[in-house]
Amino acid sequence: GMPILFRCAVKPTPSIFKEQDTVDFDSGTDAKLLIRGRHDPAIVHRARVVADSVTALVLCDMLALRYGTDWLGPQQGER
């Protein structure tokens, strides 16, 4: 068949410049976190995998709606 093409937009993740409470895992004590500068991670590479997975789930759902789900179970002669 034909390829499935669609566009997807991803909102940039924000850096929060407000002081936040956190935990120091090494010492196990409470700590404060203050971000200076911009440290936004590039989530586009992860978002592509999520979009691929959601597309696969939706296609399987559409196939199940069209053809049913009997083919997902054991076939004749199988246990």
Image: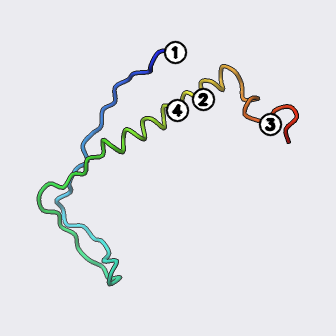
Q: Residue at x 86, y 31 (%)?
A: 76
Q: Which x, y percent locates residue 67? A: 69, 21
The count of marks equals 4
Lateral position of residue 69 relative to residue 77, left or right: left
Q: Nearer the viewer, mark 2 or mark 4?
A: 4
Residue type at tag 2: Asp
> In this figure, which residue is indicated by the disc labeled 3?
74
Q: Earlier in the sequence, mark 1 or mark 2?
A: 1
- Please say if the residues under marks 4 and 1 sit with CB atoms less than 8 Å apart: no
> In this figure, which residue is indicated by the disc labeled 1?
1
Q: Earlier in the sequence, mark 4 or mark 1?
A: 1
Q: Height in image: 12 above or below 65?
A: below
What secondary structure is found at the residue carrying circle 4?
helix
> In this figure, which residue is indicated by the disc labeled 4?
56
Tag of residue 61: 2
Q: Which x, y percent locates residue 23? A: 32, 75
Residue type at tag 3: Pro
Question: How much space separates mark 1 and mark 2, taking CA atoms?
Answer: 18 Å
